[in-house]
């Protein structure tokens, strides 16, 4: 990632609750904006997720607005596609996993939260579901690079050549994710489909015993490891936590005053 990529992400972090929001909480926000009878979310739902995440009065100028919009839409474009009616939708689990990359948490916390989105009722993944899991994580990281053409934003539509380039990137990410999922599954299960799949513990063991060399990009799921982002992001995180603690303390004080007033009236 280049410094300009880190700067763009930092703008979003500074105007949103992401630095004090866990990946699980981001996933729940996306699910909450997804129709109950669907496994896909549309742009209206995406707008709702953004509203839920932004701090009140967070964006104070056009630069912050455009940087925030572009960052979120980069992740959206990494998983969304057009339906028969021409409207864009995305699988909510893949969008949640991708946006979770921008939340607060370590590599392990983000991987564990995303794993829970895709696992079956036995906590396992097949090759296909693991491919979706890895594609959503890798796709989000790749989309944040300025080397990938930006999607259409309020600044203007995307050029046709840029759209082709983005499609090529998505295809490459999908191929890489499929190959990695296949490699992990075969290494862990021996290719035995009767095994049922790979659980998170087995994935972690595989990663630590050699998989790390195949997917070193997992390390930068922890945004504090990005050059040029670490110190400022940690400072924002600490400041937001302090504000949350102050709000909670004020809320407890208000509740105590209300109870005291009720007691006096009684």
Image (cartoon, rainbow, N blue to C red):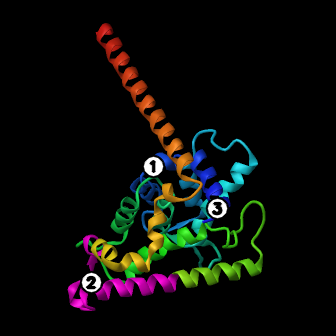
The quadrant of the rendering that contains the N terminus is bottom right
Q: What secondary structure is marked by label 2?
A: helix
Q: Residue furthest top?
A: 264
Task: Tell me if residue 96 is in the magenta stretch.
Answer: no
Mark with earlier residue (2, 1): 1
Q: Which residue, given by chain and number where applicable, does mark 3 sit on?
A: 5
Q: Is residue 60 visible?
A: yes
Taking the magenta stretch, the answer to whether it contains residue 176 is yes
| Residue 233: percent from left, percent from top | 54, 48
Local SS, label 1: loop
Q: Which mark is residue 188?
A: 2
Q: What residue appears at the point 63 percent right and 68 percent down from the top-left corner?
A: 145
Mark 2 to mark 1 CA distance (whole Å) = 33 Å
Give the alpha-carbon distance from disc 2 to disc 3, as whole Å: 36 Å
Residue drawn at x 73%, y 44% is: 61
Which region shows up in magenta?
A: 174-203
| Mark before the other along the chain sequence, 2 or 3 | 3
At label 1, counting other C-alpha atoms closer than 10 Å, the crowd grade (few under 14, some 14-19, many 20 or more) is some
x, y (%) of residue 169? Answer: 61, 80
- Between label 2 and label 1, give the one nearer the viewer: 2
Q: Is residue 62 above or below residue 195?
A: above
x and y percentages locating residue 74 in the rendered image: 62, 66
Nearest the eye: 54 or 34: 54
Can the viewer see residue 38 in this picture? no
Q: Is residue 214 above or below residue 217?
A: below
Q: Position of residue 55 (x, y in %)?
A: 57, 42
Q: Chief secondary structure of the magenta span?
A: helix
Residue that numbered label 1 is attached to: 21
Do the residues under discs 2 and 1 have CB atoms within 8 angstroms? no
């Amino acid at each position: 990632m280049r410094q300009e990529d880190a700067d763009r992400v930092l703008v979003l972090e500074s105007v949103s609750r992401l630095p004090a929001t866990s990946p699980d909480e981001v996933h729940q926000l996306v699910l909450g904006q997804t129709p109950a009878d669907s496994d896909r979310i549309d742009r209206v739902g995406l707008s709702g997720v953004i509203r839920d995440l932004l701090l009140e009065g967070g964006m104070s100028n056009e630069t912050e607005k455009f940087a925030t919009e572009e960052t979120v839409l980069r992740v959206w474009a990494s998983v969304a596609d057009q339906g028969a009616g021409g409207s864009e939708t995305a699988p909510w689990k893949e969008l949640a996993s991708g946006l979770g990359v921008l939340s607060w948490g370590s590599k392990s916390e983000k991987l564990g939260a995303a794993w829970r989105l895709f696992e079956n009722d036995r906590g396992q993944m097949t090759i296909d579901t693991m491919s979706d899991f890895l594609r959503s994580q890798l796709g989000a990281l790749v989309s944040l690079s300025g080397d990938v053409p930006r999607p259409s934003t309020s600044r203007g539509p995307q050029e046709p050549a840029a759209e082709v380039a983005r499609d090529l990137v998505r295809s490459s990410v999908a191929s890489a994710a499929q190959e990695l999922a296949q490699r992990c599954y075969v290494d862990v299960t021996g290719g035995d489909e009767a095994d049922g799949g790979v659980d998170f513990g087995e994935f972690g063991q595989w990663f630590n015993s050699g998989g790390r060399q195949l997917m070193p990009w997992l390390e930068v799921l922890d945004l504090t490891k990005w050059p040029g982002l670490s110190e400022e992001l940690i400072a924002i995180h600490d400041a937001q936590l302090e504000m949350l603690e102050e709000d909670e303390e004020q809320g407890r004080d208000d509740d105590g005053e209300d109870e005291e007033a009720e007691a006096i009236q009684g």
